[in-house]
Image (cartoon, helix red, strand yellow):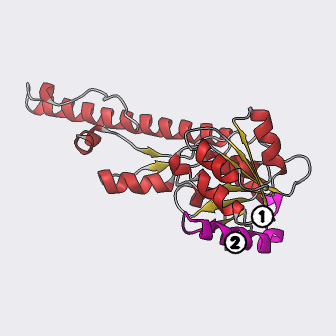
């Protein structure tokens, strides 16, 4: 049903190239990538850096929060602060209760999250997301990101192979892979500047989103109007050549459908 009805969609918008590839595979249709808006005006770089790593997310299984806690439990010289609540909180607490370098704050208001994002040494991310807002928010605060190398984060974080890197990737959602990535980050931390992180995050601003979505809709409406005029012209020509047939041709504007 989903594939069959997709033929009625005029245009697809994907929130990342990662999702654009899924649209192409599932529907054999092209899509336009328009990244979601991120509040880069609210998330800004201020204050001094602390000596802790931050993870902030809903505590649901695919976020792999207990795995992050387990990794830091194996690195007692590195401190982790975790913000978030959800069904996996109990699992994370069970691991954290056995060590002294992991602090679970549970749910926190936005001002507390912002304060920690601004002062963290790096933001740790373990999920495979379609886009992933929080790694961009962290970069807007000038904070590097250590992320699992799959999903939208591959488009929002610049790895060490980039001239102006903003983070480090790890290839597997495992404790060993994350530990190795943290070691790689600490060895290369001097190459990652708050300014580069901030500049990268600004690619996903609200103003940019508004501009791109407006341009997309206007372009599609203009295209729809041109198609409508072409149909009218064809209908009129056929009506003159074969009276009665022209009225059978479609000459109405079909509402624009965007997915």
- Residue 167's x, y, as percent? 70, 63
Q: Looking at the rendering, which quadrant does residue 192 occupy?
A: bottom right
- Tag 2's secondary structure? loop
Most common SS among magenta residues: helix
Answer with mark 2 or mark 1, whichever residue precedes in sequence: 1
Q: Quadrant of residue 182?
A: bottom right
Circles 2 and 1: CB distance less than 8 Å?
A: no
How far across and down, in percent of the image, does residue 48 sit?
92, 51
Rendered position, 89 above or below 79: above
Spatial CA span between label 2 and label 1: 26 Å
Disc on res. 103: none
State the residue at coordinates (31%, 32%): 228
- Which residue is found at the position 33% from the left and 52% from the top? 29
> Horizontal and vertical percent for residue 52?
81, 56
Q: Which residues are magenta?
A: 169-196
Q: Quadrant of the C terminus?
A: top left
Q: Is residue 249 left or right of residue 40?
A: left
Query: In which quadrant of the rendered view does residue 72 lie?
Result: bottom right
Residue 76 marker:
1
- The image's mark for residue 160 is 2
Residue farthest along the front direction in this orientation: 98
128 or 228, nearer to the observer: 128
* Residue 195 visible, this angle: yes
Quick check: is 74 in the magenta stretch? no
């Amino acid at each position: 049903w989903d594939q069959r009805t997709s033929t009625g969609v005029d245009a697809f918008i994907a929130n990342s190239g990662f999702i654009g590839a899924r649209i192409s595979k599932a529907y054999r249709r092209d899509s336009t990538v328009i990244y979601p808006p991120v509040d880069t005006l609210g998330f800004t770089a201020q204050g001094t850096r602390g000596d802790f790593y931050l993870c902030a997310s809903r505590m649901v299984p695919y976020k792999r929060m207990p795995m992050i806690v387990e990794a830091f439990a194996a690195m007692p010289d590195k401190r982790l602060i975790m913000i978030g609540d959800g069904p996996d909180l109990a699992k994370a607490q069970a691991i954290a209760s056995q060590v002294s370098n992991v602090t679970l704050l549970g749910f926190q208001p936005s001002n507390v999250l912002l304060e920690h994002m601004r002062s963290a040494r790096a933001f740790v991310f373990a999920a495979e997301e379609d886009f992933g807002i929080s790694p961009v928010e962290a970069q807007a605060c000038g904070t590097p990101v250590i992320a699992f190398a799959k999903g939208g984060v591959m488009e929002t974080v610049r790895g060490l192979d980039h001239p102006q890197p903003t983070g480090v990737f790890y290839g597997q959602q495992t404790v060993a892979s994350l530990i190795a990535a943290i070691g790689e980050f600490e060895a290369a931390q001097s190459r990652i500047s708050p300014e580069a992180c901030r500049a990268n995050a600004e690619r996903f601003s609200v103003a940019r989103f508004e501009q791109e979505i407006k341009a997309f809709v206007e372009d599609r409406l203009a295209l729809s109007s041109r198609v409508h005029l072409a149909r009218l012209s064809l209908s009129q020509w056929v009506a003159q050549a074969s009276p009665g047939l022209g009225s059978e041709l479609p000459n109405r504007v079909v509402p624009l459908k965007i997915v």
